[in-house]
Every structure is written in structure tokens, then in C-alpha cells.
Amino acid sequence: MSRMFGTLAIILLAVSIGPAQEARTATVAKNGMVVCVSPEAADVGVAILKKGGNATDASVAVAFAMAVTHPAAGNIGGGGFMMVAPKNGKPVMIDYRETAPKLCDKDTFAKTTSWFDQKAVGVPGTVRGLEFAHKKFGKLPWRELVEPAVKLAEEGFLLNKSTANSLNEYLKKPGGNEEFKRVFGKDGGKEPWKIGDRLTQPDLAKTLKLISEKGPDAFYTGPLAELLLAEIKAGEGYIRQDDLNDYKAVERETIKGVYRGFDIFGPSPPSSGGICIVQMLNMLENYDLKKMGADSADTRHLIAEVMRRSFADRAKYIGDPAFTKIPDFLTTKEHAKKLIESIDLKKVTPSESLADGIPIQDEAKSTTHFSVMDADGNAVSNTYTLEETYGSRVVVRGAGYILNNEMGDFNRVPGVTTRKGGVGTAPNLVAPGKRMLSSQTPVFVFKDGKLLLVTGSPGGRTIINTVLCVVLNVLDFEMDIQAAVNAPRQHHQWFPDQLAVEFTDQKLIDELTAKGHKIVKRRQGDAHSIWIDPKTGLYHGAADSRLAGKAAGY
């Protein structure tokens, strides 16, 4: 497979939109690699690998560290999905998605106008998820994996530009509680944060220390649980001790597909990511994308049409498998061929024509991903979230951590699917104990039984399409991993019926507009990825500079 280096990466960066991006090259290492949004957390992960920890140990340590250093999405008050690829075993998925409190039902949020309070909080799953991963795959003692995060919270860390700007922006926004402003505001919010300022979090340090010393149960029972429940009660929220007692992380079968001889492994429901990625690749396999060209109008149009159809299926069929029967045909090659029968390369298919009986009406997000590999070839692809940036913007008083606002990921109004993007279909309606539908898409790609690519992204519904773009860039367009991460992306999610793009080539935009696309420009994703050279076995880590990040290896 040919590789395009250096100059191409710089060109691709130049045509993307959003914050100025630095030209990077991939970090190459032999014994281990950690790629994530937080440089401090990446260094923590590599230190764990050097101590003899495996990829899962490093991932647990990175996740806890990012709860300190990347408060916009790193968390212990949220949830997510971890994909683990053992060196000599089948990839598995650990589902630690949040659940709906037992006091909630399908009508609880029908009239909700704000998701920034205690009512919006789902039962947190992160600590149980990390516990599950550690018990099944970890080597080092639990305490050694949490202690680096304790130290970062106690001693603080220096704010980079991204985190300083983010805090300054979100501290001004409405919603949340005063504790959010107290914990994350500089001098109580009186002064703006600057690059190089040190953020310390003593309450969070105490919380993490308890989790370190007494184990994961300390989060769900005892004094920490009492603090959480008091915070929920203060805002008339729905979580009770029974919800915390009953929460469990779940191991699930992965979604597997084959694309041009590559084996694709993605997360299964309640994440829609695995099904959608495999379904879209099944559709695209019927076209010669390499011959069509990465940035031709026909290629960009085709990918948008494939996205449109997959997101329509997502709304129709996918939810928590404990509550919804999900059809087996969604990831079949036959279904893909049926879906592409209506694709016209000359013009768009109106999204409303794909509703298939779903009534469409008019009507009056933050995650983070990291990828890890160890010296033995074990790999982890982990995506976890608070939902919106800084979640509910509610900090548990006395405990120092932010709570999610994940209840907003359920379909809010039963039966109401809107042209603006609201979905009201049955598979993702609220029910007690139910896990809300997710777009998180941690992915592995294998070739001839050997791991080739570890990737994923944040970005709400854009996550699936960001991952698709990275996978296509590597497999079809034969870009090196840094160029594949840097390249401009696109996103279509059925409704609203518009194509979001990062590229600024006016000729290409005009050609897509002529085909009927309504173009909007938007930065998309933060895909920290690892490519494994099949010839040398070396790990190539690519940090995504759309936000921040570091690829650290040794």
C-alpha cells in the first residue's frame, strides 16, 4: 500500500476550517503508544506501559487522568464504550453507557427546555466500566492506575490554549450550578484563565483518592454516593441509591463487517456506531472510490448519500437491545445493495423521501476518544462522554466532578421526528434502566488477522461520520495516518437535510450545491488514531490538532 507523507498533510491542513492547526507528523514507536486529547494523560498512559502495564491498564489510567485534565469530556460522572483487542483473542466491547433512572419514563422529558441541571443526569457508568475492563484484562493493581490522576488533581496542571479558552467560554454560559463556577472559575470566576495558569482540584483529588484506596464501590456507595444523591436532590433530579446499586457495565459482542478484505470491528447497540460504520462501508464497497478520487464532487456526494441512508436506518431501528429488537439485516451486504438502489450520482435524495412512514414535523454536544497499544500488541479504543461540553455543568458539591446530561440523548418527544434533527421514534424512547442510544464509534481495523488501525472520535452524531472519513482515507485513499486524520471531513445525519463540510474548495462546494446539497461549514471531530505498519510492526500515533492532543510512545 502506497503512503503519502509530509507535503500532503500540510496541504490538507491548509484547506480545513476552524482553529488554526499545526502541521504534524505521526509519532512512531515500537513498544507502546497512547494518543489522546490531553498531553498530561498521554504521558500518564505511557508511564503505566513502561511500568509493565498493558493497554487496558494504561487506558484505565488515561481515563481517570482525563477526568482531571480534560474536564469538558473526560469524566467519572459520565459513561462510554471501550473496545479491547487482545493480542491473541477476539475483540470485545465493554458497554458502560449511562442508564435512565427508574423514576423516568417516555414522557418525563417531553417538555424539557434545558439540559443543564440535575434532572438531565443519567446514572454514571464510567467507574464501573473501568473496573470491568481492569478485572477482565488488567495486570497492575487498581490503586496504581488511579494514583496519577489523584496527583494531577492535587498538584494541578498547566492549562493549554484549548482548555483555557474552553473554560472561559463555558463559565459564562447559563445553566449548571454555582459549584461549577467555583471549582472551575479562576478566583471564583472573576478572572479569565490564561495559558500556563495552574488548575488544581482538591475536592476531586479526595474523590479519586477514595476510589483509589477503596475501589470502584466507593463511587456508588458510602460518602461519595451520599454527596451525589444530595446534589441530585438539590435540583429535583431522578437518580436514587437503587439506581447506583443496580448499575452494571456489560460485555457485548462487537459488530463485525468486511470491507474490501479488511475486517472492521465496531461497538454494538446501544451504540449505533458499529452498525452504521459497517452499513456505510457495505454500501461504498460497490463503488471504486480510489478511481473516483478522494475530493471529487461525485465521491463527496456519494459519501453524503450513504450517510443519509444509514442515519435514517439508525432512527428507525436502533436502541438499547434490552428494550428493542434490532434487525439482523442492517449490516448485511444485501441490505446495503437495496439501500444504494435509490442513489443518484447526479443529484441528492431528499431526506424526507427516506422517512418510510415516520411522520416528519416542524418544531418550535462533548465526548473524547483515545487509542492505546502496548508492547505485546494488545489494543484499546475507548470513547467516553459527559454528553454536552462539560455535561450538565453541574459539579457534585464536595466531590469535585461534573455530572453528565446524558438523558438528552434519548428521543425526547414520543412520535415527533423533525426536519431540524429531533427524533421521536420508539427504539430510543426513555424507559427505567434503559441505556440511551449513542453515536460513539471506537473502531478496530484488521488485515489478514493483524491489527492495522485503532480509531474513534468525539462529536455527537458527527462521530460516526468522522470515523468513516478516517477509515476511508486509510483504506481507499491510501493516506498515511496523520494525513488521514488531518484531511477535511464531512457529515450528513438525515435530518436536518444539510451537508456539513470542513473543506473550503469553492469549486467543490459549487459542484455539490449544483447536485442539490445545502452546504454548511463546521469543524468536525477529534480523531486520535494509531496505524500499525504491517511490514515493520511499528506504531504510528496521530493526534488530531483540531482541538489539542498528543501521541506519546516509547
Image (cartoon, rainbow, N blue to C red):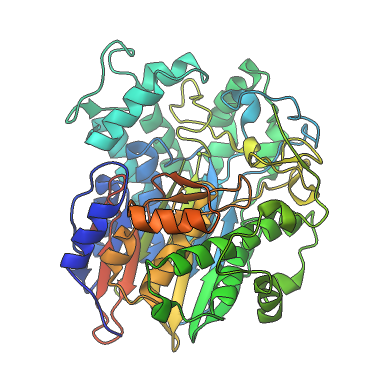
Q: Quadrant of residue 505?
A: bottom left
Quadrant into which the N terminus falls: bottom left
- Give how far across and how far down residue 275 sits, in percent: 62, 66
Q: Which residue is drawn at 55% across and 54% down?
A: 516
88 lies above or below 231: below
Q: Quadrant of residue 457?
A: bottom left
22 lies above or below 317: above
Q: Is residue 52 visible?
A: no
Quadrant into which the C terminus falls: bottom left
Closest to the observer: 262 or 406?
A: 262
Number of numbered discs visible in the structure rendering: 0
Closest to the observer: 134 or 92?
A: 92
- Give how far across and how far down residue 25 sits, in percent: 18, 63
- Give how far across and how far down residue 543 sits, in percent: 28, 56
In the picture as drawn, the residue positioned furthest to the top comes out as: 190
Q: Is residue 485 visible?
A: yes
Side of 29 relative to 259 (left or right): left
Q: Which residue is drawn at 23% across and 53% down?
A: 14
- Give how far across and how far down residue 161 sits, in percent: 23, 35
Q: Which residue is drawn at 77% across and 30% down?
A: 108
Q: Residue at x 46, y 14 (%)?
A: 178
Closest to the observer: 186 or 228?
A: 186
Side of 383 relative to 361 (left or right): left
Side of 546 relative to 438 (left or right): left
